[in-house]
Image: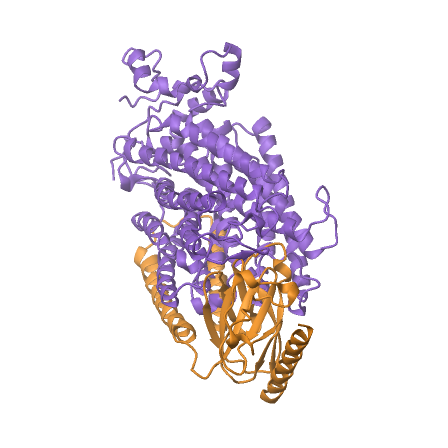
Amino acid sequence: MKFNLVTIFVLFLLAQILLILPIFRRRPRDQQPRIWLAESLPLLLFGAVYVWMAMTAQRLWADDRYEGPSLTAMQVEVVGVQFQWYFRYPGEDATFGSTRPELVNAAAGNPLGLDLRDSEGDDDIVSSELVLPVGREVDLRLRAHDVIHGFFIPGMRLKENAVPGLTLHVHFTPETAGTYPILCTQVCGLGHGHMQARLRVLPAAEFADWLQAREGKRRAEEAAIKGGV
Amino acid sequence: MSTDPEIDPETDPNVDPEIDRASWGARMDAGSTTSDRLPRRWRNALRPIFTTEHRVIGIEYLVLSLVAVAAGTVLSLVMRIHLVWPELAVPFFGQVKPEDYLALVTMHGTLMVFFVLTTAPLSGFANLVVPEQLGASRMALPTLNAVSFWMTAGALLILLAAFAVPQGAPISGWTSYPPLSAVAAAGPGQALGMDLWLASLTVFCLASWLGSLNLLATILNERCEGMTLMRLPLTVWSWLVASLLVLISFSVLLAALLLLFSDRHYGTSFFIPAGDLVAGHVRSRGDGSPLLWLHLFWFFGHPEVYIAVLPGMGITSSLLANFSRRPIAGYPMMAMTTVLIGLLGLVVWGHHMFVSGMNPYAGTAFALTTMAIAVPSTAKVLSWLATIWGGGLRLTTPMLFSLGFVSLFIAGGLTGPVLAQPALDAYLHNTYFVVAHFHLIMAMAGVFSIFAGVYYWFPLMTGRLMNGTLGKLHFWITLIAAYGAFFPMHFAGLAGEPRHYSQLSGTTPLLENLLPLQRGITFSAVILASAQLIFLANLLWSIMRGEVAPPNPWQATTLEWAPSMARIVKTSTSGLDPSASKFHQNIACRAPYEYGLRPNGLDFIMQCDPNTKAE
């Protein structure tokens, strides 16, 4: 990236100088420009640069997107809804419970439409912030309920749209602990500019504590609901 | 056909006026589009407006673009001011709500892309000079051409009406991705406002189609004797390729618009997936795909960029040759690269979709085609530099704007190969980096070529020259302010700021830190917009008081400046006598850019000049 930016900035300055210099010469030269010198040769050089750029770009992209995550990667689901990001962890069974759009009811504490009859969803944890351990690969599965959203973590150089009707996967490994903003980069309606969340990357031990706390909270809520019934 | 410039069809015994009228005169008659039952006085008043005279239609297109660009600029200023002073109530507008901001974005983009950057360089200038540059006696389909203009004007009115309906203008951006654009409940403005947007673009599609059919037919069939393809001015080459792109890409857009309309009103689900839940209700009846819209839209959207910028390249090539007093370097290469850019432009649409959920292998394919299009673009830039290098530059206003075009085209173009790399685009997509890229290469370069064209062809429209001092002042302020407004946007993008955010304060510190940068951009934008008042003043003053232009004020070689043109200007400003636009100089003996010291000691030789031996 830096190399690209420096290269194009140098070329930019060079081209502007070539553009400005002739202004100061008012007398035309008699001979025609020699096409091979002025055009064909530089064009070949530029062509070589473009081929090289295309090759490195292809290699980078292939490393990033051609292959799926390792089988041991942590699974997290990201759901974009006007104007909120939700993050779902599959819990101890490492399996996401099924969801149905008809069941979505954020006011009743079920923003993702979890099907309560599906026991696989019993241990699912839904969070409004993305919390990840340092150094472990994560496989995000991106979904959207309503319109297209753009899932963007600038600090992780990661962007992929969340498209209703599709489940898309991106994977990465956070390497530095810290807090990173998560933004929406695809116009999704009037709250687009405020559709933001946080990524917290924690050391492994702290992450385990966080997950445990969330599980405890979920169990307490479950008990409360059952007690109420 | 006679080549005597002084011949007059009304008095010349060799031209039978009856046959002449029957063949083309009747269709050229300006009154033929209005009803014969109208009182004569009305008919005379309407005659110059509802005309089929191509030059008047060209001017009408340019005026339409001027209205659209004024509206679009005001919208962008409201956005810029709101972005950096979110609490401020904007004069004549009031407090800008988040949905207002998105409506402004949507309308700004739609107005600028369709009604300015497509309309002015292609329809406006081509109508103004294409038949003359070809040595043709007329447009091939003049009535169709006039219908095309009035449909475009209608489309503009329909679009602007979206501001006036309940809930206002649509908010889904000029790309209108569904389901946001397919479901009325998805946001304010997505009901009637969105329908008007769809209607406006549907009419615009049809209008562009008709206009391009006429241009293609004219360029291919109406060329005068000797005007071979390799003698066409590069402007004509660019209009030819742009017209072809219009035919191919606007038909796909039209299909997409109709499918979207059908999703909104006839219960289909082309673009709405199963179980799509908007505002608490499941909206889909079938299982469609939002990605289908992205493919259809960008199959149109990318060629559209070239439709907007190719004519600018053509104008720049012609003007650089003229004001350097040198032939354009590598004419065959320039013609070929124009065609190549058009062809490649049809197969690069996926580079708008690297992170849209498209298959990553497709991403690689589109990255390669996109990188390939950099080659002909580079060839053009090298040719322009080679043309002015060693030329004796005449720094007139149109020349300055052409040099500005090259400068901005390079500035915006160099970020192209960066954005073409999917892994880098994954970070930069939909950030201000992209905003900077396309505003420099498409918007600013496009507008600079429009200014160059207006200053250059102004004598053909009014018989007068525009004021040079005001023109140069206009150029320098515009150039500096354009860089001031759009260059810093690269840094905002590199910092990660997404487009379409209505405010930066109260969000994350990541974005709040960019406020000072954005304030600088807003200042530049205000200066940029204000500088255009100089242009408007110059325009009005020059129409009334400008220096009367000699017949060929720029000592140009192309046929729109041929000697008989002076007569046409005179008659068309005083009464628009359509028969005067019959062109008598219709034989082309040579290549279009014979500048510089020629064997016979002349500084330039017009294409129609038979006295010097043909090349």
Answer yes or no: is residue B341 visible: yes
Q: Is residue B562 left or right of residue B73?
A: left
Q: Nearer the viewer, residue A154 or B471?
A: A154
Q: Is residue B156 above or below residue B85?
A: above
Q: Residue B318 placed where, x, y %?
A: 40, 43
The chain whose colour is purple is: B
Residue B459 visible in the displayed image: no
Answer with the quarter of the image where residue B495 lies: bottom right
Picture coordinates of residue B20 (x, y %)?
31, 16
Spot occupied by residue B317 in the image (x, y as percentages of width and height):
40, 46
Name the colour assigned to chain A in the rendering: orange
Image point (55%, 37%), residue name: B66
Query: Is B275 on the left-hand or right-hand side of B359?
Result: right
Q: Is residue B402 left or right of residue B162?
A: left
Camera-side residue: B319 or A140? A140
Q: Nearer the viewer, residue B318 or B127?
A: B127
Determine the residue positioned at 47% across, 75% down: A171
- Quarter of the image with the C terminus of chain B is top left
Query: As displayed, is residue B291 above or below residue B130?
Result: below
Q: How is the image coloured?
A: by chain
